Image (spheres, rainbow, N blue to C red):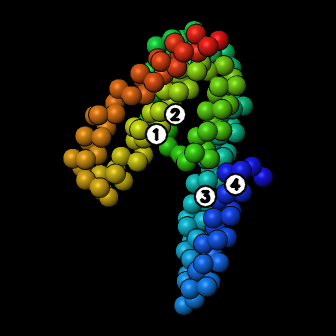
Amino acid sequence: MDTVTMVMVGLAVALLIYALIRGGGLANDGVKLAGKTLLNALPLLLAGFLIGGLVQVLLPPELIQAWLGKEAGVKGVLIGCLAGGLIPGSPYVIFPVVGGLYRAGAGVGAVVGFVSAWSLWSASRFPMEIALIDTKVAVLRYVITFVVPPVAGLLANGLARVVG
């Protein structure tokens, strides 16, 4: 078990103990809500893990290198950004996919652009952001952050050349 997992398990156990001490059924209510959340998210998680695994074995490395490799340059960064902004998923789905793409030959810039765009542009989160925050705020945030993923990817390409 890695450090992050141990910290999360420790935090969950500490909060559960605290809820038990406070009483009033808080621990039971919390466990029930966690179970409902898990049941609601489980199909998406399973589908995401399956997609992540299949993408890694179905996309030929030559294709990945041609479209996203370091030789693809700006085109690779922009394609990485576009894919990152459009592909939905949690970190547990996205990072295995991105790791597989990187191991198959995607360049550093395309990977950084992908992850940055996924974090900032996510098309799947945009409607939720509008609904829960505000249309004006969501649009302003997207406009302000629009240049960040491509710039980050291009900087990563440049730094990767310098660092080696």
Q: Residue at x 46, y 39 (%)?
A: 119
Tag 1, which secondary structure?
helix
Q: What's the CA distance linking mark 1 and mark 3?
A: 22 Å
Q: Quadrant of the C terminus?
A: top right
Q: Nearer the viewer, mark 3 or mark 4?
A: 4
Q: Tell me which label, 4 or 1, sits earlier in the chain.
A: 4
Identify the residue position indicated by label 1 in the image: 119
Mark 2 vs 1: CB contact within 8 A: yes
Identify the residue position indicated by label 4 in the image: 5
Task: Name the image quarter holding residue 146.
Answer: top left
Mark 3 vs 4: CB contact within 8 A: no
Q: Nearer the viewer, residue 47 or 6?
A: 6
Q: Which labelled disc corresponds to residue 43?
A: 3
**Left/right of residue 115 with respect to residue 14 in the rendered view:** left
Type of residue at label 1? Ser
Type of residue at label 4? Thr
Crowding near pointer 3: few (<14 within 10 Å), some, many (20+)?
Answer: few
Q: Nearer the viewer, mark 1 or mark 3?
A: 1
| Image coords of residue 121 (percent x, y) | 40, 37
Crowding near pointer 1: few (<14 within 10 Å), some, many (20+)?
Answer: some
Q: Nearer the viewer, mark 3 or mark 2?
A: 2
Q: Tell me which label, 1 or 3, sits earlier in the chain.
A: 3
**Position above or below: 85 against 135:** above
Q: Tell me which label, 3 or 2, sits earlier in the chain.
A: 3
Crowding near pointer 4: few (<14 within 10 Å), some, many (20+)?
Answer: few
Q: Tell me which label, 3 or 4, sits earlier in the chain.
A: 4
**Position above or below: 13 against 104:** below
Mark 4 vs 1: CB contact within 8 A: no
**Left/right of residue 145 with respect to residue 73 in the rendered view:** left
Q: What's the CA distance linking mark 3 and mark 2?
A: 23 Å
| Image coords of residue 17 (percent x, y) | 65, 78
Which residue in the rendered view is the most extreme toward the bottom? Answer: 24
